Image (cartoon, helix red, strand yellow):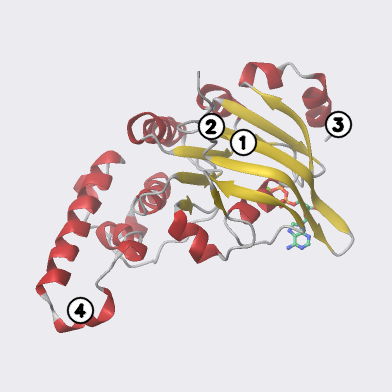
């Protein structure tokens, strides 16, 4: 047997805002190719955790590593460039862009030729543009929206717009994907479809996923491991079945 490096390691992370400790010595690891859910009552520190992982907040102390790469203290664009993509709880799509162009935005960090070559219409830039558009079509097919590429993303049903955001994150070719309540606000059909796409991201693309989600049914079906936060502390962790039966977890949810 050999030990594998975690896809993502959160080590003893504390985040303090003047007087308030939003995260208090939290540690967990995300195994490669797994879905790791972070759950907990309102105010538990889930969004703060995502903001530290994506570089929006700086940890007061502790470390975050992506494989063997130290992420601690890096700015959001560097962390994204190293392979951590995220979606937001609320939609953040440009209102009039087509699905294709919304997905192309996710390719932006992968563009090597840059503005000069594109402006001069160098052959290398045209080749790169074709490569990006091909990949956008593949990702659109993956999320089931390849028939909608030329439609304004904003004209799609809400659940499909959320899938476009997921697709845009996938276009960054991430190693780790952070999903903040990916099925919130969706219809039952949309929830089912999105959960299947998320499982497929793990199973077919091998991308590790950190998931913040309130729908416990989906968490229990989708997650390989769960970390439970309450008042900024990690109060439990393990498989879905383990945390579901943990008295501290039951207490945290009933007491909230
Ligand atoms: P969750 O996402 O689990 O509901 P949050 O991470 O949003 O919880 O919040 C955890 C705690 O940190 C809350 O008490 C919240 O008010 C506080 N908090 C979050 N962000 C900030 C901030 N930028 N400034 C001050 N307090 C914050
Ligand atoms: Mg939150």
Instruction: Kindly state the secondary structure of the residue where label 1 is placed.
Output: strand
Q: Residues within 10 Å of mark 2 (few under 14, many from 20)?
A: some
Which circle's residue, 2 or 4, is located before the other in the chain?
2
Q: How far is the residue under mark 4 from the one under mark 1?
A: 41 Å
Give the CA separation, mark 1 to mark 3: 27 Å
Which residue is the site of mark 4? 117
Q: Give yes or no for contact between labels 2 and 1 (Cβ–Cβ under 8 Å).
A: yes
Above or below — where is 95 with respect to 220?
A: below
Do callouts 3 and 2 mark residues in contact (Cβ within 8 Å)? no
- According to the picture, the residue beneath numbered tag 2 turns out to be 31
**Mark 4 or mark 3: whose residue is earlier in sequence:** 4
Q: Residue furthest left?
A: 123
Check disc 3 and report the residue beneath it. Answer: 255
- Mark 4 near mark 3, Cβ–Cβ under 8 Å? no
Coordinates of residue 126 in the picture (x, y in percent): 13, 69
**At numbered mark 2, what does the secondary structure look like: helix, strand or loop?**
loop
Query: What x and y, as percent, mark residue 55?
Result: 60, 60
């Amino acid at each position: 047997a050999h030990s594998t490096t975690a896809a993502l390691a959160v080590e003893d992370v504390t985040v303090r805002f003047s007087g308030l400790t939003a995260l208090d010595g939290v540690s967990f690891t995300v195994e490669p190719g797994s879905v790791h859910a972070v759950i907990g009552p309102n105010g538990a520190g889930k969004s703060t955790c995502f903001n530290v992982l994506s570089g929006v907040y700086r940890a007061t102390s502790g470390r975050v590593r992506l494989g063997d790469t130290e992420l601690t203290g890096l700015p959001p664009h560097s962390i994204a460039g190293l392979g951590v993509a995220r979606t937001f709880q609320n939609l953040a799509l440009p209102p009039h862009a087509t699905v294709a162009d919304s997905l192309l935005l996710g390719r932006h960090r992968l563009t090597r030729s840059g503005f000069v070559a594109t402006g001069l219409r160098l052959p290398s830039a045209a080749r790169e543009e074709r490569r990006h558009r091909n990949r956008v079509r593949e990702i659109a097919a993956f999320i089931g929206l390849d028939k909608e590429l030329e439609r304004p993303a904003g004209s799609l049903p809400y659940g499909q717009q959320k899938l476009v955001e997921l697709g845009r994150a996938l276009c960054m070719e991430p190693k780790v994907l952070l999903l903040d309540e990916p099925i919130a606000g969706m219809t039952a059909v949309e929830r089912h479809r999105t959960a299947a796409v998320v499982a497929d991201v793990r199973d077919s693309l091998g991308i590790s996923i950190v998931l913040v989600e309130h729908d416990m049914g989906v968490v229990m079906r989708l997650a390989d491991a769960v970390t439970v936060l309450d008042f900024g502390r990690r109060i439990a962790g393990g498989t879905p079945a383990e945390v579901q039966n943990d008295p501290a977890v039951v207490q945290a949810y009933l007491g909230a």
